[in-house]
Image: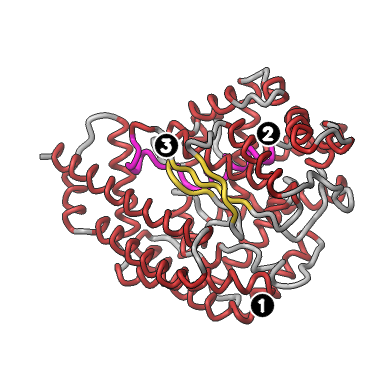
Amino acid sequence: MENDAYRRLVQRFATIHDVNAATKTLDWYARTKAPKAAQTGLGCQIATLSKQAHELLVDLSCADDLADAEAREPWEAANLREMRRRHRLASVLPADLVEAQVRASTHAHLVWETAKPEGDFAAFLPALRGVLEHVSTGARIQGQALGLSPYDALLEGHDPGRRNAAVTSMFAELEAVLPGIVDGVRGGPKPPGPTGKKRKLKRVARRMMSMIGLPETHARLDTSSHPFTAGDSDNIRITTRYSGRPGEALMAVLHECGHALYIAGLPSAHLGQPVGAARGMTVHESQSLLIEMLVCRSRAFAVHYARLLRDEFGEDGAWDPNRLHEVLIHVEPGVTRVEADEVTYPLHVVVRHRCETALLNGTLDPADLSDAFDEAMDSLLGIRPRNPGEGCLQDPHWTLMRGWGYFPTYALGLLMAAQLYETLRAALPDLDVDLARGDFAPLAGWLREHVHGRGCFDSSSDALLEHATGRPLGTGAFLRHLERRYLPGMT
């Protein structure tokens, strides 16, 4: 019976979700709490669970149920579509390859943790070669099965329906415009932002989380070498790092709060099902960048941000809202992507896109990645990293199997964020008043209705964006936003 087949699929995918959630919890523990000696054992556990989840997905009885199942209503139809998409992507990959990929990734991340602070690219190179070999094999297999190039197959896993030709076209539009804007508004060395003891910064960060709608009963904050967010709606885990400028730790928390707010707002009625998941990483990154860069660098939010800092650090001229806003929108090329302003940020992503597409198509040998990365930084941003730790090793994504093909979603997410921001500002005329008093409820409510609560009901990020804004993804809203915020005399 068709309904029996669908019910069995719902149970199967709920189990797969739980196995994957346990895997992510282990990964979070490995990256935040675990002693170094535990890393190898944890990597084996993660690999075993990943293999089991894969086997559940590609099992022949799953394929039979997918062939027989029928949906009774639109959400079931969307869920079945997403089930079939996941099965199609996974079924062509041998389980042993999936396990080997995870083992290579876990080893590479462990090597990266040591190589990054030392700036030791030579130490990382063998692990990079191992990851690239496994990524290339999987992408080639999936691409052949789907009729896609290997890189498009990777994009399909992050942003269904997105193709590299469209990505390259949008990036070319940004490359043609952004360097000129940077030259026109750059402000030299960045003025000092929030400073203070880590315990006080943590208190401000937790107040920010609560302000955005993430109470301590549902979300926790930890430290890691690279900020990330993991978990489900009632078990959200945010991390930041305190190794850079103190104020950047707070901006990283705001970025991760955007991810967390999306997770918390996914449709609870479909938790554990594919249709209840995020609609790809372009949408996910749009939510983090919307909060961090567009909303929380606004003049209105600077009023509340200054109040938070005064409450914790006392009265100080540095917490004047106007001065703080100047710090928040200061533009100056720097080497670090996660600390970049919103004007230079997309160019950091273009650097990585150039490098990883060249690595995957074989025109760039892994041994030459560090030099190629530095050359691209110099070309697009006019700055060269002092060492590989500041350069190609600054991100952990190339240690992760699902990190490949991910980088474009950061810049695409910023474009999507600008498009959503333009629309929601028209829908929420009192938004600036709300932000100035730290009230994020109207903003979160709009996002939950138009983005978060739709999960994977829409077939692609463009379909979701058209529902929310009336048009597919483009560069126009982002460039208009930059003109309004940075070049008001030109509008």
The residue singled out by tag 1 in the image is 120
The residue sitting at 78% across, 44% down in the picture is 194
Front of the two marks 3 and 2: 2
| Depth check, front residue: 186 or 259 | 259
Name the residue rendered at 72%, 54% in the picture: 175
Q: Quadrant of residue 373?
A: bottom right
Asked which secondary structure carries label 1, the reply is loop
Pointer 1 and pointer 3: residues touching (CB < 8 Å)? no
Give the magenta-colored segment's residue range: 270-294
Q: Residues within 10 Å of mark 2 (few under 14, many from 20)?
A: many
Q: Residues within 10 Å of mark 1 (few under 14, many from 20)?
A: some
Residue on which disc 2 sits: 295
The quarter of the image holding the N terminus is top left
Residue carrying label 3: 455
Between the C-alphas of marks 3 and 2, the distance is 22 Å
Location of residue 197 with respect to 268 vertically, above or below? below
The verdict on residue 272 being magenta is yes
